[in-house]
Amino acid sequence: MRKIIIILLIIIIILGLFVWGYSSSGAESIKDYWTSVKETITSLFTPKSKPADEVNTVYLGEIDEESLIVDLNEITEDLFKDVPWLLSMESLSPCDEERLYYDAVCLPMDVIKKDDGSYDLEHLFKQVKEQILRNPIYGDMIIRGMSDIKLRNGKTLGELNPWMQEFITKSDAAYNAPTDAHPYGAEYWCARYENYEDIYVSNEYRHYANALCVLLNRLTMVGVREWETTENWRLNTSNDDMALRRTEVAPYQESLPALVLGHQDKGQDFEFLIGLNETDKRYEEYGDHPTTPPDSPDGPPPGPTPTPSPKKNPKLDPPSLPGNGGNNPSDGDGRVQPTEPPRPSAQPEVTPTPTPTPNPPPDGTSYQHVDNGTPPATPPLTVPTDTTISDGHGGGTPITQEPVNDGAIPEPD
């Protein structure tokens, strides 16, 4: 009897809720209301499926690791063939008077602005890649800087791309090689050809440079920004031997205009941001700017721009310790620098380092990094056609490599 009473009470309660729900629902009929109740009950017990446009939705934080991996074995010589192989002098003594600061890495970028006042980003980016392809000192700087970038998953770009450390190891060995034998320093990445006065980058260097440019092509161009750096590199000019000139981490920070590139994760958040300074193309890194959208074709995004911190004057910053930029393996990787070196009122004089008497290679010995034959003929270079020298790809007669200005990268006239 008690069970029957309980059942009747449950039925009365359900009917009461149904009548109350119907009267407050505004349904036109009991049938319409009952249909809506059944749909609600069914939805409670049916697994939810993603809409078609959300099936492939990726959530913030997932790293697109594959796009950051460049296989050196897949890099071919015909990449970036519109850029000549002629050695760029922007980081060497012929351009010392043209660079804006004594520790400027290269010449300033050629800046072009569109009718709406926005930067031509592709034009800036093209200049960066040209320096990488033609300037081993510049390429060395960017490979060293980027190889240490750590992703949120704990891996570094250098770990994802073993060729970066391979390049650094070869470069360190060259800069630590005896200066009475050739090649040493930046000579390792250079090539000279018989009957040609110009200096070119070697095939080996160009292979690594092509890989670096492919990696940069996979980043997003954010735009030109004036953000304060967390790290930036400069040219060490304290060594009078041009073959030993190289870059180092600067002991100061700056917030000058720079072309900013970044890698976005699958949720379009920035995993890291790097910059190439407009005044000298130097490599820079920045802190987190996760909400900064890339510039659109119509110009930079609206809204307030970051307030730059007081700018340092690199022209008054003295050179660091003499030597090879602090980048020798015995000295560490160049990142151990004074946090704030003494700042004299004028640039101190650099005592020239005596150039040792070089010993040219013995007769019949070629530099191991040079393909015998004619240099690569790429626009806008004009290479003589009245030659029987090998084309460097198997034809012609092998030649003996001549020393480059007795082994050193040439000084200005």
Image: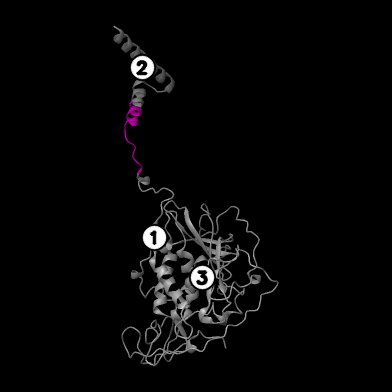
| SS for dot 2 | helix
| SS for dot 3 | helix
Kindly identify which residue carries mark 1.
67
Does the stretch in magenta take in 233? no
Q: Give how far apart the Cα atoms at labels 3 and 2 are.
A: 83 Å
- Image location of residue 242, percent across then percent down: 53, 81
In this view, the residue farthest toward the front is 330
* Disc on the earlier residue, 1 or 2: 2
- Looking at the rendered image, the disc whose residue lies closer to the viewer, 3 or 2, is 3
- Image location of residue 147, percent across then percent down: 45, 64
Q: Which mark is residue 107?
A: none
> 128 or 164: nearer the eye?
164
What stretch of residues is rendered in magenta? 38-51
* Disc on the earlier residue, 3 or 1: 1
- Looking at the rendered image, the disc whose residue lies closer to the viewer, 3 or 1, is 3
The colour scheme applied to this rendered structure is one colour
